[in-house]
Image (cartoon, rainbow, N blue to C red):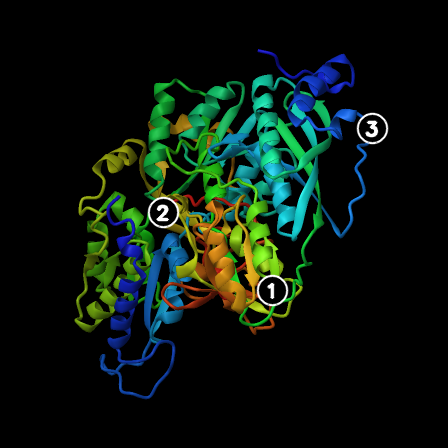
Amino acid sequence: MAYINDFKDPILAQRLLIKTLKLENRPPNTQNTTTPKLENCPQTFNIMEVCGTHTMSIYKHGIDKLLPSYINLLSGPGCPVCVTDTAYIDMAAELALQDNVIIATFGDMLRVPGSTCSLSDMRAQGMHIQTVYSPLECIALAKDYPDHEIVFLAVGFETTTPVIALTLKSAIKESLHNLSMLFSLKTMPHAMENLILDKSVNINAFICPGHVAAIIGTRPFEVLSETYQVPMVIAGFERLDLISAIYTLIQMKHDKYYGCQNLYKRVVKPEGSLKALSLIAEAFEPASSSWRGIGTLPQTGLTLKPSLSHFNAALKFNLTLPHAKVHPDCMCGDVLRGLKKPIECLLYQKLCTPSHPIGACMVSSEGTCMNYYKYNS
Amino acid sequence: MERVTLAHGSGGIESNRLINDLFFSYFNNEVLCRQNDASLIKSISGTLAVTTDSFVVSPIFFPGGDIGKLAVCGTVNDLCVSGATPLYITAAFILEEGLNMCPLEKIVYSMAKAAKKAKVKIIAGDTKVVEKGKCDGIYINTTGIGVLEGYELSQKLEVGDQVIISGTIGDHGACIMSKRKHLSFQTSLKSDCSSLDEITKRILDISSNVRIMRDPTRGGLATTLNELLAYTDKSIMVYENAVPVKEEVQSFCDLLGLDPLYMANEGKLICIVSKEDSKKVLSALHQHPLGQDAAIIGEIIPDSSHKVYLKTSLGAAKRLSPATGELLPRIC
């Protein structure tokens, strides 16, 4: 349990914040007339935090309110709920309507709007939809309901995938034939590359997802930062982690150091988790993936290996990709790419609220719009 | 082992046996045991307080309590924080066919124990049994009656009034979450389920300037503070550093992406009192076992938008919104 409180320390965090502010010799969130020391640049320094947990932590601690005005924090596409495509929810809804099917899902997915309704609406109408905290619970569910098909909604990034692979392994070991999954698994490095290459987005630096790095290691991020000359840090999730990430990125920019620094060494090893990586490699192979509001991106997803295709619910139930209906004013895609702030969306706080979400970014506790609404409205 | 059957709710011999052997035996008091269709109570002088609440907690047994203790303490606390002295409680049970008598007896025993501790009498009740699968073991509704013996809380806030919490927050919510089916956490989390009658009495005895008291149950501290501001023209600033949270509760919440400010409490109260009296109220709380971790966590500010703000440990002021939707864990 070492470090459990060290990185929460408010005094240390405040001291580091003051040091961060002194880097530009300007008070927080004010435009002043003193000459900036750093490259004489009043221009904005756009830092994207990719992971939803980072977004949540930044807003919760109020870090966004305390930074120099030239720092612009952008939230990226790292919340698995936010990036889930409407068509995926529609397919899950179609499955929920089938006789003898139990949908097992992480709780956050319940309220994501589909074309006509959310899974939460369907549960209220009597469809059997069960919330789980871990995919492994599906093993017990499959045994408890031998006459039903358990369909797990397999969404998430590299962090969730190893447990999903482990669940498939357990199902094989236990000879369970009534468990399948609807997959929309995503991977981060190529999604980040896509953002770097996107000319409409101007990201100057990245706070890389700490949990993902714990699985895949530091190398993929090092390659990205070196290839595209973008400063990156891998950071943890406490207030001290995040302020030190921002402090380090400003210094890296100042020093023109383009690499990836690992500030989360207490969790992230350079090689990642070999055990988790081997579990992923046993069950999955790279594929393209569809991202809400962004579209299909190559090499940003995982698909089941052909030998395991009997676990693929889309094949088992012969599902075809539906034509999803999305509210024309929903700006989730632009928000997820850092192009727009939630407040710039026409629906934000008017039609789209946490009680009545229209876009997925307003659903999850890690969603950009949800955090913006919760802490800033 | 004997189980509850539909016959126990049919009003016949089995129902009577259940009522006599279990409920009358544990809740034993002269008003209840007269066995009238309606219990008759002597006239009570003064302003009366009435409250009702239903309890459907799952699991029904948890570290620090069970659904029975919760059903009594929950209603007692609603009376206490209204400034009333709890006098009587009624209890209605909805039982699921097949429920074991043994846990039912434990629940009834713990209701009797909690009622005795809070000096209230359970004077009326009802039992219904529903078919297996139509409810989750046992649901309990309790209604409470109390009388105002001191002054009526003004509910009017003044700038500078201090916000006090009687102890650590989130204990009950975190405990219940950790014991949910399939969530196999090994923790030392314990519910704070307890009656607040002694500490509300101490507070009201020592200060005549208590504006509002509330128990921050569902939705936690953040939601309750928002609720109590609804009909005022003031706002509250909460100081994050000052809010007491047990380390195990904080760690559990960190793991699941939850916030203790939104986790339920079942043995805590919020007291808003004049600045002049705040120190002596705090001191009185510290002298009671249930108030040892009490702290001043915020104050009333002159912002007429009736919002709750949080001054974070870093010094930023953020809006503290009421809870929305279900409390759900994050998925990565």
Label 1 vs label 3, nearer the camera = 1
Kindly identify which numbered label has been placed on residue B247: 2
Please tell me how crowded label 2 is: few (under 14), some (14-19), or many (20+) other residues with Cα within 10 Å.
few
Q: Chain of mark 3?
A: B
Mark 1 / mark 2, whichever is N-terminal? 1
Q: Pointer 2 and pointer 3: residues touching (CB < 8 Å)?
A: no
Position in image of residue A124 (x %, y %): 64, 38
Q: Amino acid at mark 3?
A: Asp
Tell me the quarter of the image containing the C terminus of chain B.
top left
Residue wearing tag 3: B37
Position in image of residue B62 (x %, y %): 49, 32
- Say whether residue A54 is left or right of residue B320: left
Please tell me how crowded label 1 is: few (under 14), some (14-19), or many (20+) other residues with Cα within 10 Å.
some
Position in image of residue A269 (x %, y %): 19, 46
Kindly identify which numbered label has been placed on residue B209: 1
Q: CA distance from mark 1 to mark 3?
A: 42 Å
Q: CA distance from mark 2 to mark 3?
A: 50 Å
Q: Amino acid at mark 2?
A: Glu
Position of residue B90 relative to residue A178, above or below, is below
